[in-house]
Amino acid sequence: MNGAENILGRIAALARVFIAIVFLIPLVFTLLVSVRPEAQPVTKGNIFFGSELTAENYERALVIAPWSLHYLNSIIFVAGVLVVQLVTVTGAAYAFARMRFFGRSLLLMVILLQLMIPSGVLLVQNFRMINILGLFDTRVALMIPYWGSAFGVLLLRQTFREVPIELEEAARIDGANLFQVIRHVYVTNAIPAYLAFALVSVSSHWNEFLWPFIITRSQEIRPLTVGLNKLIKTTDQGAFYGQLMAGTLIVIAPLVILFLLFQRQFVESFARSGIR
Amino acid sequence: MRASSRRKPLVALLQPYLLIAPTLVLVLMFNVVPAIRTVNDSLHKPARGLNAAGKPPEFVGTQNFRDLFDHGHYMGSRFLRAFRNTIVFALATVTVGVPLGLLLALLFNHKQPLLGVWRFAVFYPSLLPLIGAASIWSFIFSDSIGLANAVLRSLGHPGLNWLGDRNLVLLSVIVVNIWKQAGYFMIFFLAGLQNIPRDLYEAASLDGAGEMQQFAALTLPLLRRTLLFVIVIAFIFAFQTVEQLQALGEGGPNDSANLLLYLIFQNISERRSWGYVNAMTIVLIGVVLTFTISNFLLFERDEND
């Protein structure tokens, strides 16, 4: 190794530490501000030391919104989306991967339109569609636009195609029907793809805000992000940052912890989500 | 399969359509039909006047679009500002965020001590809800007690009004977006780097190429496809990430940091701007579609190589 490369290696090592610190600063300060008494100003020199620790910010944040209810709503929302998606995506992926039928490419093209015109930009008309269906302010309204997933169909179609056709033929000879073939031959052999799809689906819907905010009115069904929005709006400019940071941590904690536990799977899933 | 179709031909014939039906119906209901309706409604204006209730909307042709691109019009001035901001926002995210993502991937590609910690540090922002990330940054940017101003003041600067100064709000929003997405872009570059065969580097270093030369002659050209892909999705995302505005100044003051989708969101409750909201959506769809189609074309071409 020559001298220039040695220097390059040291610069890289420094860059790593520097970048990691810069990226972590917001999280670290959120944590610090959330456990400091609101009355003590965040001035230099006593952000880390010389301040009392308190749980009062958490206590006050907990009063502003019914977080356990919002938690439950978020869980119902992402689970309700995922469970239906798994069914619709599996059926369509099998049909497109292994069946021959009239109009196959055309129908696939129609489904792929979802990737070209994402539901996110169609807020106005989807809002209207939900009103026409009479679903405004219901849990179904929250979930229904996401029940069909072109991304999921593409991902699983690709995976199903890699399953050896001989496995299906063998199962057919043993008398398996279509449902059994899909369940025992294809689903069983595509578990990593399903896991990747589930992680992407859950993390993106857990973070959804605009759609739930527009399409629901009742506290009883609104997810965490909408609760956080309420906290942001009730936090006076510059007055109650401790309580806002405490509330923010309450909301972001589960995904951050989930990521710490399944880091490798997350990274792989997100990589697959892009490489279609 | 052939045997079963001889026994019950109709069921076998219908099977594929039944399997596809749920996805197809949902995509038609929530993507295709709404898109067509957007086009139709963007060419209409709600009926006006005292007896307007119940009257069908009036066909106005391209009037809504002409109003939107008219600086003098009340909605046009808002739209043009948001449109300009959206372009600036997207360009800034791509020109800073994408190279940063590549740099992160190069730094955190090889096995090294604490790799999990490094990757967590740069990737966790992309997992946060946008509104949660914005909430965190609203403290950092806050006028009196914020971190950004504390740093400035320690350097002798009086501090800046990050979320109140019309020249700074958009910059603040851009900083948050880059911080949030660089780690996500990194993931794709990491995947791209793994696909480059190791022996290419071994051969290159046997030939005496240094790390910089290897990067310029090997890594960058071989990452071309990933780079193009990330640039395209970075643009597509930039047009759809607006929720942070909810905690970072709500597009103000005076729309100086408003973004197109957020302006649409703000206007949804105002029934009178229905035609404009749909026309704005068409512009947004047009931009997003341009990028997604180029994505498909790039991808198809590479697949046929």
Image: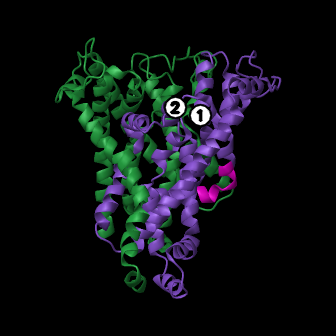
Chain colours: A purple, B green
Q: Quickly name the residue at label 1.
A: A222
- Secondary structure under badge 2? helix
Q: Quickly name the residue at label 2.
A: A213
Q: Position of residue B34 (x, y in %)?
A: 33, 41
Q: In the rendered view, would you say B118 is above or below A219?
A: below
Secondary structure mostly taken by the magenta-highlighted segment of the chain: helix
> Which residue lies most toward the top here?
B50
Indicate left or right for A76 with B279 as reference. Answer: right
Residue B272 appears anywhere in the view: yes
Q: Which residue is at 55% across, 63% downward?
A: A194
Disc 1 residue type (three-letter): Arg
Q: Disc 2: which chain? A: A
In the image, which disc is placed on residue A182?
none
Q: Is residue B120 magenta?
A: no
Compare residues B119 and A124 and report the one nearer the observer. A124
Answer few, some or many: residues within 10 Å of disc 2's Cα (few below 14, many 20 plus, some between 14 and 19).
some
Compare residues A89 and A24 and report the one nearer the observer. A89
Disc 2 residue type (three-letter): Phe
